[in-house]
C-alpha cells in the first residue's frame, strides 16, 4: 500500500511539470475559472465549520495570523472576481474572532498573539470598509470600527523605553521575541495608519504614519542604500539598543511600506510620499526572477517556513493596491503581476485535486510544496490582475459606508457615538455602585460561612 501511494505521488508530481491551470492572463473568463479552483483549494484548508473546531481558523499548521491573511484573500476574491460564494463564511469568521473588546484580541489567542498577528486581521476589516463589503448587522461592530480598534490597541503599545520608540514584535513578556523590534509589526502599524488617514481624512493617522516611518529610518530598519533603492530589513534586538539590524528582506515588509506610502501619496499629494512609493517599487526587483515573484531570503536555500510561504500573497495584494493609487506604477506592477500569475498558475497542478499550488513559480509546474500559504499566494497574484478593472479603495467621502469611531477599542462595547465623557458625577456614581457590589459580595460570603 505504501509503495502504491509513493508511486501515485511521483506520478502526480512529474505529470504536473507540464500541466497547470489553464490561465490566459488577458481573458476574464479564464481568470475567473482559474481563481475559482484556487479559492476552492484554499477553502479546503478551512476547519471552522467542522464539529468542535474554532470558527475562523484553518487547519494546522496554519497560525491565527495566517487565518486573518487568508480571509483578506477571500475578501479580495469577492471583490476582484465579483464572486460571493464564500461571503457568509467570511463574515462569520471576521466577526467571531474580534474578541470581547472587539479589537482582535480574542481569548483563544491572547497568550501567544503578537502585534503583527493582530494587524493582519485589521487589514482584512480595513479592506472590507474600503471595498464596501456588506456591512455587519447593526448590533455588531462595523468594519471601520474594528480597524480603528486594532490601530488604537497597537499604537498604545508604542514603546519609548527602548530604542527610542517602536513596537515590539510580541505583546506579552513571556513570548519569545518580546525583546525584538521587527519591521513587520511597525510597518503594519504604518500601513494601517496610512489607510485610516485616507479613509477618514483624519490627519492624526498621518502623523502616526510619519512618526513610524521616521523611527524605522532612524534605527535603519529602512535604508536608502542608493538614491532610488529603499530596502526594509527584518528587525533589531532591544538588548543591542536596536543598533545591530538583522538584514533579512521579506516581500511582505517591502509591500507594507510600498503600499502604505502609496496610500499617503494618494491622500496628501505630497511629493515626498510619491518619491518613496516609486523608490520602494524600484527596489522590489530583488524579489523577482525574470519578472516572476519569489521569496528571496528563503526560497533560494530551498527552505521557507510555514509563515514565509504566505508572504507573497500579501506582497501581491499590496502591489495591486499601489497600482490603484499611484498611476505611474501601473505598467511596472501589471507586468510583474502578469508574469508571476502565469508562473503561479503553472504551479497549481498538484495534489489529488489537480489544482493544489506550489511555492516555486518559475519551476514550470508543481514543486511538491503545498499549504494554505501557497494557495493564498497563488490566488492573490492572479486576482490582482484585475486591480485596474475594479474601483480603487473607497473613502468615507466618496462612497465608503462603514461606520467607525476614533475611540474604538477603548470602550466596553462597540458604538458609533462620540467618545464618552466621564465627569465627576459619573465617577462618584461609579464609586457608589462599586461599594454596593463590594458589600453584596462580602455579605454573600458571610452568609455562606454561616
Image (tube, rainbow, N blue to C red):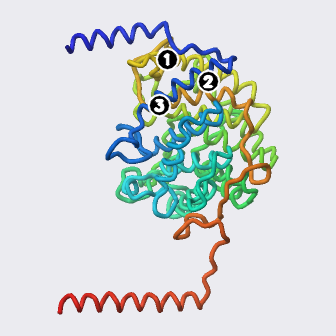
Residue underneath mark 3:
42
Task: Establish if 348 lies above or below 239.
Answer: above
Q: Position of residue 125 (x, y in %)?
A: 59, 49
Residue tagged 2:
32
| Nearer-N-terminus badge (3/2) | 2
Q: Please rate how many residues cluster around mark 2, counting C-alpha atoms within 10 Å: few if below 14, some from 14 to 19, many from 20.
A: some
Residue 163 % position (x, y): 53, 57
Q: Residue 368: in sight, yes or no?
A: yes
| The quadrant where residue 13 appears | top left
Compared with 420, 83 (above or below) is: above
Number of other residues with Cα within 10 Å of mark 3, as a class: few under 14, some 14 to 19, many 20 or more: many
Checking the image for residue 103, the label placed there is none
Q: Position of residue 14 (x, y in %)?
A: 40, 8
x, y percentage for residue 352? 38, 18
Classify residue 396 by image quadrant.
bottom right
- The one nearer the camera, 258 or 389, is 389
Residue found at x 37% / y 88%: 438
Residue beneath disc 1: 347
Amino acid at each position: 500500500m505504501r509503495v502504491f501511494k509513493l508511486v501515485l505521488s511521483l506520478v502526480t508530481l512529474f505529470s504536473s511539470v507540464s500541466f497547470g491551470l489553464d490561465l490566459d492572463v488577458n481573458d476574464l473568463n479564464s481568470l475567473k475559472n482559474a481563481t475559482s479552483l484556487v479559492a476552492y483549494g484554499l477553502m479546503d484548508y478551512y476547519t471552522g465549520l467542522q464539529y468542535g473546531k474554532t470558527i475562523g481558523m484553518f487547519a494546522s499548521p496554519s497560525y491565527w495570523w495566517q487565518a486573518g491573511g487568508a480571509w483578506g484573500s477571500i475578501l479580495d476574491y469577492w471583490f476582484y472576481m465579483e464572486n460571493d460564494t464564500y461571503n457568509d463564511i467570511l463574515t462569520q469568521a471576521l466577526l467571531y474572532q474580534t474578541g470581547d473588546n472587539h479589537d482582535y484580541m480574542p481569548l483563544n489567542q491572547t497568550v501567544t498573539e503578537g502585534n503583527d498577528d493582530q494587524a493582519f486581521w485589521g487589514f482584512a476589516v480595513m479592506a472590507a470598509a474600503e471595498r464596501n463589503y456588506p456591512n455587519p448587522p447593526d448590533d455588531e461592530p462595523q468594519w471601520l470600527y474594528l480597524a480603528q480598534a486594532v490601530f488604537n490597541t497597537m499604537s498604545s503599545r508604542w514603546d519609548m523605553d527602548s530604542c527610542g520608540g517602536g513596537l515590539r514584535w510580541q505583546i506579552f513578556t513571556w513570548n519569545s521575541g518580546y525583546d525584538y523590534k521587527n519591521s513587520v509589526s511597525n510597518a503594519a502599524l504604518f500601513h494601517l495608519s496610512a489607510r485610516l488617514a485616507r479613509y477618514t481624512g483624519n490627519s492624526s493617522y498621518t502623523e502616526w504614519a510619519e512618526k513610524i516611518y521616521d523611527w524605522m529610518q532612524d534605527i535603519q530598519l529602512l535604508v536608502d542604500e542608493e538614491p532610488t533603492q529603499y530596502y526594509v530589513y527584518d528587525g533589531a534586538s532591544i538588548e543591542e539598543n536596536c543598533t545591530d539590524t538583522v538584514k533579512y528582506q521579506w516581500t511582505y515588509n517591502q509591500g507594507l511600506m510600498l503600499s502604505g506610502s502609496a496610500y499617503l501619496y494618494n491622500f496628501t499629494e505630497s511629493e515626498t510620499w510619491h518619491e518613496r512609493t516609486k523608490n520602494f517599487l524600484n527596489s522590489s526587483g530583488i524579489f523577482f526572477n525574470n519578472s516572476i515573484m519569489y521569496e528571496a531570503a528563503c526560497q533560494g536555500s530551498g527552505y521557507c517556513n510555514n509563515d514565509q510561504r504566505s508572504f507573497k500573497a500579501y506582497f501581491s495584494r499590496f502591489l495591486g493596491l499601489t497600482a490603484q493609487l499611484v498611476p505611474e506604477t501601473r505598467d511596472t506592477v501589471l507586468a510583474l503581476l502578469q508574469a508571476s500569475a502565469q508562473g503561479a498558475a503553472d504551479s497549481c497542478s498538484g495534489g489529488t485535486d489537480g489544482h493544489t499550488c506550489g511555492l516555486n513559480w518559475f519551476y514550470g509546474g508543481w514543486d511538491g510544496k503545498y499549504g494554505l500559504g501557497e494557495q493564498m499566494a497563488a490566488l492573490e497574484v492572479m486576482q490582482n490582475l484585475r486591480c485596474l478593472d475594479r474601483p480603487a479603495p473607497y473613502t468615507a467621502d466618496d462612497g465608503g459606508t462603514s461606520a467607525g469611531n476614533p475611540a474604538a477599542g477603548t470602550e466596553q462595547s462597540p458604538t458609533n457615538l462620540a467618545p464618552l465623557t466621564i465627569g465627576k458625577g459619573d465617577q462618584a456614581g461609579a464609586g457608589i455602585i462599586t461599594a454596593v457590589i463590594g458589600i453584596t459580595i462580602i455579605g454573600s460570603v458571610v452568609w455562606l460561612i454561616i
